[in-house]
Amino acid sequence: MAVLLLAEVTDGALALDATSKAVTAATQLGEVTVLCAGAHAADAGQDAAKIDGVARVLVAEDPALGHRLAEPTAALIVSLAGDYEHIAAPATTDAKNILPRVAALLDVMVISDVSGIVDGSTFERPIYAGNAVQTVQSADPKKVLTIRTSTFDAAGSGNPAPVETVAMADNPGLSEWVEDKLAASDRPELTSARIVVSGGRGVGSEENFALIEKLADKLGAAVGASRAAVDSGYAPNDWQVGQTGKVVAPELYIAIGISGAIQHLAGMKDSKVIVAINKDEEAPIFQVADYGLVADLFEAVPELEQKLG
Amino acid sequence: MKVLVPVKRVIDYNVKVRVKADGTGVDLANVKMSMNPFDEIALEEAIRMKEAGTASEVVAVSIGVKQAQETLRTALAMGADRAILIVAADDVHTDIEPLAVAKLLKAVIDAEQPGLVIGGKQAIDNDMNATGQMLSALVGWSQATFASELKVEGEHAVVTREVDGGLQTIKVKMPAIVTVDLRLNEPRYASLPNIMKAKKKPLEEKTPADYGVDVSPRLTVLKTVEPAERAAGVMVGSVDELVAKLKDEAGVL
């Protein structure tokens, strides 16, 4: 039983956290070969080789693979698929773009957002925005799956695995990259941060979001936001936590001025410790919080920031 | 240019999902059903393209139970020109898998020859996020998922995509399959006169057999359960108490 795991590689760098978590899941399925693809992927390949549990690393370098475009990356994976029973990737937007295409080219069903592995063909996955968990069994000869990283611990580091290079498959040439507008930030990445501080509509304005950011910076945390806050223009879209945004499961999640709509809860309820600060004691967020504080956030948040010193 | 918009009938997004106690699935009997919200956004985009003169005809397609007629009538009331319903299941609890849906849509593409397919990025019931990508693979067209901006410029479409960490803009060859994210537009409500007019618009009914497609599932659902509940938390009375709890009890600071 062998697994081909597509590593998350962005502009030549390995996303270690997402990839290591997916490795933990993949080792339950068989021997793990990690594929690093990109215009430059050799460094990412060296980093991936050091993840504990990785048996082998394949590096594919080609300009066509440079911006995670679905068509060339899917063609590459299909060209390598013969040797593997499972093809997996962390459930990032890149992998969700690529793996269903791979599955269709192999005439198998994709299994998206796997949150638990029962056996080699049986998987758990959330449906209805996390309001239900389904166990599905695949009858396909190959299983193509994306792994919800928030439910797996990251694999540690181990002895470096051998690294080989593989050739690029034919590029169908259907799409080209124009530009990336990635938010530049010194803060940790939202989905891999140990602590996340999120603000909701209760924060009231874009200016007031500085309160949330200040507390986050004090804690070395990532900043999140509810959809209500994003839709009101208080916070940029890529901060959104929830079913339609990012799914996070940090050690500590601090929800400030967030009422706790189902769609937000779906994105954070697997966090280890949840703190809610809201002036409305009836807010549904308190039902999932480990520690709730009914208070005016404009008083409580600066006080909290000061006392964490 | 003809634009094809696949729409799915799903549980209304405002309805609280109830998991059946016997583990066989989510209760969909006598529950309000609506068009998948992401598909509504896709349809709105297609209608705007027609209003702007970029599209000549908007065809809505739904695959599922006969009751999806209602969803297609909504699509027609919003502004689609005609609709195709492929009746592929009898029981409202039967979900046709993305691979089978993609195969049926490929057959519809072969018959209709659209220049563009716009669909939702995922359905809010099975949350698979797969049909558009699979369809694109089967027909060999370009794909652009998670679209927050779409501009068709002659032989190409320029699409801005919502990806982890920000936005990516790509240029894809037409014909293309585009799947849309929340921020592309705000869908209109169908007006009463348009709802009346929609009753007269053509709605064609087909079966998978008409297209020679096998829709048998590849995945067997063994069980469906409620997610694990969190243990009840405590309310604290002050910031000091909160800091103490986080340091001493939870050990996360």
Image: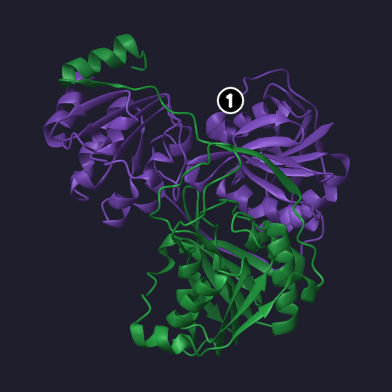
Chain colours: A purple, B green
- Mark 1 Cα shell of 10 Å, populated few (<14), some (14-19), many (≥20): many
Q: Quadrant of the image for the N terminus of chain A?
A: top right
Secondary structure at badge 1 equals loop
The quadrant holding residue A151 is top right
User: In the displayed structure, does residue A203 sit left or right of residue A59?
Assistant: left
B38 vs A213, nearest the viewer: B38
Looking at the image, which residue sits at the far top?
B248
B50 vs B72, nearest the viewer: B72
Q: Position of residue A202 (x, y in %)?
A: 20, 44
Q: Position of residue A254 (x, y in %)?
A: 31, 31
Visible in this render: residue B48? Answer: no
Residue at left 55%, top 81%? B153
Image position of B99 with respect to A205: above or below: below
Which residue is the site of mark 1? A154
B197 vs B182, nearest the viewer: B197
Q: Chain of mark 1?
A: A
Image position of B221 with respect to B91: above or below: above
A207 vs A91, nearest the viewer: A91
Visible in this render: residue B1? Answer: yes
The quadrant holding residue B216 is bottom right
User: In the displayed structure, does residue A83 sit left or right of residue A28?
Assistant: right
Image position of A84 with respect to B194: above or below: above
Q: Position of residue A69 (x, y in %)?
A: 65, 57
Q: Quadrant of the image for the C terminus of chain A?
A: top left
Residue at left 70%, top 64%? B102
Identify which amino acid the numbered label 1 is placed on. Answer: Ala
The quadrant holding residue B141 is bottom right
